[in-house]
């Protein structure tokens, strides 16, 4: 094992790698409860989503560790799960089974693009500023959902949205959770988001806002069945051949592209694994990511992608895929804690959504706001996601306005032909929605 992962060459050992694996798991364990909470809004079985989330994370992380040998963990991605639930299923009234089929198709396309080398061309065709805008916009969208789930922001017929009743019990608990999580992260506590959820849930029990466990069976129990969601994606593949589903698939694909590329580079840089500014075994890492999406869709969850929280494991000393194996094992172990789902209410998960949104918005500082032809499509991408309540609409607006502003500025030659193709697709997207 030491020879396979090159422990000596990378200056690591079993203890360091094991600690790194545990650290990464704690930093991203919140997804085990946040993902079922979000996706169950579509009518999907919460227990099945919990099992699918844990298994997709375990399988994807194991493939990454064994095949690509990177200390990178995977799980259903934040942002894409919100897009799946609130835009595709609830907003566009697409059955969740069909939405899962869209995730499956995007994963299969991802595998083909990775194996053929086309993936790099597609990513390079999209301007860096738009990629950054997409990430920041998703952050705002996730945070907005968190504020809604907390009851901090509510509907208002006169102004669309307004401040909620901050004296309500669930809202007060969520506000407490936000404060605690902010303190933990500001203190550089690894796994602060997860610990914040635990503390919030415990406090919620004392004040009667969260169900209190009365026996060990309320903490540890049998693994929930996958039967309600398993294989549904394959049964509904025939429903994806519409313009609307094409936009859905492209959105799944693009966001997964950006998440994966950014995460892999970030983790590799932090671990000192980059060679001549290139990522060794990049193809294997990308294959692991795309295969995890296919596995996740088959089991019954939204797009599975690489997690930037893996950098916490690298900070703890992780340098090889053995750390990923440890993380994968912990996701499997977590399967027996499904009864805790009943204690993780929206008030407990809302702070996690808001804080993850904050972290994703850090991309805003990298956008070239002083270039008007860049600022307009970037701004529209960012602002449209929360206001239109749709990640796809934000991407569409940015990708439509980018060629327009670039042409007017006399920079038509800088526009990649792929961007023109996307321009046409998203114009059709708006026409289709108008109908």
Image: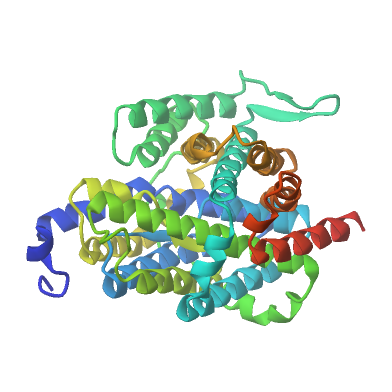
Give the percent coordinates (x, y) of residue 176: 47, 24
Looking at the image, which residue sits at the far top? 167
> In the image shown, does 266 or 26 lie closer to the viewer?
266
Residue 351 showing in the rendered view: no
Within the image, what quadrant is residue 168 found in? top right
Colouring method of the image: rainbow
Looking at the image, which residue sits at the far left? 8
Q: Give the residue at x 56% y 46%.
A: 129
Up the image or down, 430 lies above or below 59; here it is above
Mark count: 0
Give the percent coordinates (x, y) of residue 385: 68, 43
Give the percent coordinates (x, y) of residue 242: 79, 72
Give the percent coordinates (x, y) of residue 204: 47, 31
> In the image shown, does 76 or 310 lie closer to the viewer?
310
Within the image, what quadrant is residue 420 found in? bottom right
* Lateral position of residue 86 relative to residue 322, left or right: right
> Which quarter shows the N terminus?
bottom left
* Lateral position of residue 385 relative to residue 65, left or right: right
Q: Give the residue at x 36% y 55%.
A: 265
Up the image or down, 150 lies above or below 81; here it is above
Up the image or down, 72 lies above or below 37; here it is below
Looking at the image, which residue sits at the far right? 435
Residue 30 showing in the rendered view: yes
* Lateral position of residue 258 relative to residue 275, left or right: right
Q: Give the residue at x 21% y 63%.
A: 320
* Lateral position of residue 268 relative to residue 167, left or right: left
Up the image or down, 17 lies above or below 186; here it is below
> Which quarter shows the C terminus?
bottom right
> In the image shown, does 347 or 58 lie closer to the viewer?
58
């Amino acid at each position: 094992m030491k020879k396979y992962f090159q422990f000596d060459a990378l200056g690591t050992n079993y203890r360091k790698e094991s600690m790194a694996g545990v650290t990464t798991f704690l930093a991203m364990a919140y997804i085990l409860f946040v993902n079922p909470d979000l996706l169950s809004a579509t009518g999907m079985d919460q227990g099945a989503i919990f099992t699918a989330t844990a298994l997709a994370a375990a399988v994807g992380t194991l493939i990454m560790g064994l095949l690509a040998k990177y200390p990178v963990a995977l799980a259903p991605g934040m942002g894409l799960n919100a897009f799946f639930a609130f835009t595709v299923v609830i907003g566009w009234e697409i059955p969740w089974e069909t939405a899962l089929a869209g995730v499956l198709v995007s994963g299969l396309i991802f595998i083909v693009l990775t194996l053929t080398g086309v993936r790099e061309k597609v990513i390079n065709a999209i301007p860096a500023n738009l990629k950054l805008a997409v990430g920041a916009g998703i952050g705002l969208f996730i945070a907005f959902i968190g504020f809604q789930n907390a009851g901090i922001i509510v509907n208002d017929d006169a102004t669309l949205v307004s401040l909620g009743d901050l004296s309500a019990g669930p809202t007060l608990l969520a506000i407490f959770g936000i404060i605690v999580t902010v303190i933990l992260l500001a203190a550089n506590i690894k796994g602060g988001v997860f610990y914040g959820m635990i503390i919030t849930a415990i406090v919620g029990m004392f004040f009667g806002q969260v169900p209190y466990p009365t026996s060990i069976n309320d903490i540890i129990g049998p693994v929930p069945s996958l039967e309600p969601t398993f294989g549904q994606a394959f049964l509904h593949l025939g429903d994806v051949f519409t313009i609307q589903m094409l936009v859905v698939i492209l959105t799944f694909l693009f966001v997964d592209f950006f998440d994966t590329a950014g995460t892999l580079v970030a983790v590799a840089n932090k671990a000192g694994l980059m060679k001549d500014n290139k990522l060794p075994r990049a193809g294997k890492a990308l294959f692991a990511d795309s295969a995890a999406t296919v596995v996740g869709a088959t089991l019954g969850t939204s797009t599975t992608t690489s997690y930037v929280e893996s950098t916490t494991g690298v900070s703890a000393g992780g340098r090889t895929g053995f750390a990923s194996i440890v993380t994968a094992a912990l996701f499997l172990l977590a399967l027996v804690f499904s009864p805790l789902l009943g204690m993780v209410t929206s008030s407990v998960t809302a702070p996690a959504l808001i804080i993850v949104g904050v972290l994703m918005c850090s991309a805003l500082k990298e956008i070239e706001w002083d270039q008007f032809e860049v600022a307009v499509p970037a701004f529209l991408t960012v602002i449209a996601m929360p206001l239109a309540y749709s990640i796809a609409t934000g991407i569409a607006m940015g990708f439509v306005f980018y060629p327009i502003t670039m042409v007017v500025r006399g920079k038509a030659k800088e526009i990649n032909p792929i961007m023109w193709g996307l321009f046409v697709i998203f114009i059709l997207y708006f026409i289709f929605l108008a109908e």
